[in-house]
Image (cartoon, rainbow, N blue to C red):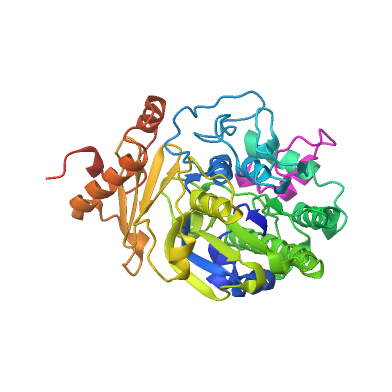
Amino acid sequence: MNIVLVVFDSLRKDAIGAYGSPPWGKVHTPNFDRFASESLMFQAMYPESLPTLPTRRALYTGRRVYPFHNSNFNLKGDFVGAPGWGPIPEDQPTLAERLKEAGYRTALIADVYHMFKPSKNYWRGFDQWTFLRGQEKDPMRSGPRLTREEVDYWLPKDMQNEKTIEFIQQCIMNIHDRTKEEDFLAPRVLQEAAVWLQQNRDADRFFLTVESFDPHEPWLAPAYYRQMYLKEDGREQVKSGYDDTSMLDSYLLKRTQANYSGAVTMCDRWFGYFLEQLRVMGLTDDTMVVFTTDHGHSIGDRNYMGKRGYPSSPEVYDVPLMIRFPKTEHAGTTSDAFVQHIDVSAEILRLAGADASGLDGRLFLDNALKGKPSSRKHVTVGWGTAVTVITDRWWFNCKVDGTGVLLHDRTAKDPFAANVADDNGNVVEDLWNRAVEDAGGDFPEWLLELARKQMDAPGCSDLAARPVT
């Protein structure tokens, strides 16, 4: 059996029509939806650690990254994106290495530039790896620099500062030669993946990983995609503010949401192109396609734009997972079982008959297909100095020193409207203990020190930091 792993960055689960719709309205995703109808769909899939690089390290190895022991990276050629933002440890074999040893031909087609920066090694084990350049602040070009008028067009003046201007300068310099849709990066990634299929028809078995940074910001796509969601024209807004949106001009918020929706629809179109390549080559009957993302993105949800680990929220943490089996076996099946990226890694290796020793991921497919509950009664997600523990009923979020507790009752009409930590001390104690247990019993001192310097989120309780009576 061939295996294809497709990862879209920052793709909100509710932006896929088969999963629902975001608060601002339904997104047009016919190819994602058709794929969903042919797949086993999961409703409770969560990352193991966040954001971009920690997620991929967990997915590529099947090993836990939280709580970031030996992961205080300060490597030349990159910024410190978050604790754990670094290379894959040399002593941790990757899926590609294990599958290659099992007789698979392996390939990575990606534009996630963080994976290819100096000191990174996310291409380890791939027979072929193709890096398509130009996303975000990838230093693909050094000129020509934008004029003041161009900066003002792409970046609202009330969002301008030295860092945001430099960000938009590099982003727009990188797209100067995009004259048609096929020049944009999501189309290029999926076209290159289709070409790889053509060039490797002789492979007995293959493992192809397709990584699209879109629909990550900046939300750049041909204008007609945005116009599907917003006819009105006005100022452009393609960057996340990572700030409160309650005072943001209402048009700019609508423009941002439309740009995001448009980027998703562009990704959907070219995902369909790739699936069609699989079909016409006669590969769908002996190929498993796994579809997921690293995280979502808040775009006005609870008056915030951006992504963060504290306070954590479903539109960022609750991610899609769809698995299309050969000959569409198990099509139309859904599962509420808790799953994490490291579990996906374990199942890929099991199904391939490859070495799966030393993994932290748990097998979940047999139970899911039989309608049985997951072996996981909760999931723990690490992001920097914060940890989130999620059960069927509770959403628990605090800093790794046990302070600044947020507890939300997922059965409430509006779960995130109130912090109920003070009224549920025993629950807080139990979930905090689970967070510590999943961390292996302790946290690195440097991470605790970072947590102590971090401000509490609004409405926090310190209940986890003191004994519960």
Q: Is residue 407 visible?
A: yes
Residues 378 and 364: in front is: 364
Please count the marks in the image. Answer: 0
Residue 111 lies within the magenta run: no
Residue at 31%, 67% (x, y): give it: 412
Q: Is residue 16 above or below residue 187?
A: below
Q: Position of residue 21 (x, y in %)?
A: 55, 70
Residue at 74%, 50% (x, y): give it: 153
Residues 106 and 43: in front is: 106
Q: Position of residue 57 (x, y in %)?
A: 56, 40
Relative side of 135 to 412, left or right: right
Relative side of 328 to 413, left or right: right
The picture quadrant where one finds residue 373 is: bottom left
Q: Is residue 355 above or below residue 260?
A: above
The picture quadrant where one finds residue 400 is: top left
Residues 438 and 245: in front is: 438
For the stretch drawn in magenta, what is the main secondary structure? loop
Please report the bounds of the magenta region as a residue range: 134-160
Q: Quadrant of the N terminus?
A: bottom right
Q: Position of residue 86 (x, y in %)?
A: 57, 32
Q: Is residue 28 visible?
A: no
Relative side of 428 to 184, left or right: left
